[in-house]
Amino acid sequence: MSKQSSREEAERLVREAMERRGVVVKQGDTRIEAICGKCGAANRVSAPKGQARVSYVCKQCGHSQTTL
């Protein structure tokens, strides 16, 4: 089975599932990997859809900041 035929098969299966209402596609919150500007620790921040800049507090040092 070639890549093209497997891709077409997957698209067909998704279309059939959507027609049967068995699959519901939802758009959730965005997860942003932010790095603290003070201590350099990695933080995972959840942002509502449509927002790019979210304020958060660093988990390591407690410094308040905004994502870029």
Image (cartoon, rainbow, N blue to C red):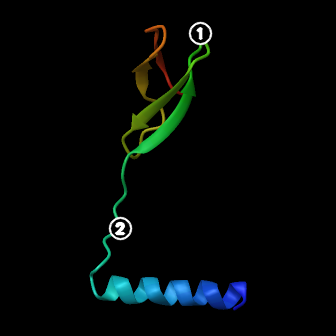
Q: Going 40% across and 36% down the picture, which residue do you hit?
A: 46
Q: How packed is label 1: few (under 14 Cα within 10 Å), some, or many (20 or more)?
A: few
Asked whether 38 or 51 is in front, the reply is 38
Q: Residue at x 61, y 84 (%)?
A: 7
> In the image shown, does 22 or 66 lie closer to the viewer?
22
Give the image quarter of residue 8.
bottom right
Extreme residue in the left direction: 21
Residue 45, image x, y percentages: 44, 31
Question: Percent position (x, y) of residue 31?
Answer: 46, 40
What's the CA distance linking mark 1 and mark 2? 38 Å
Q: Is residue 42 left or right of residue 29?
A: right
36 left or right of 4 in image:
left
Q: Residue at x 36, y 52 (%)?
A: 28
Graded by Cα atoms within 10 Å as few (under 14), some (14 to 19) or many (20 or more), the crowding at tag 2 reads few
Question: What label sits on residue 39 in the rendered view?
Answer: 1
Residue to which mark 2 is pinned: 25
Name the kind of residue labelled 2 in the image: Val
Q: For numbered disc 1, what is the local secondary structure?
A: loop
Percent position of residue 36, x then y: 56, 17
Quadrant of the rendering where the N terminus is positioned: bottom right
Above or below, 51 relative to 62? below
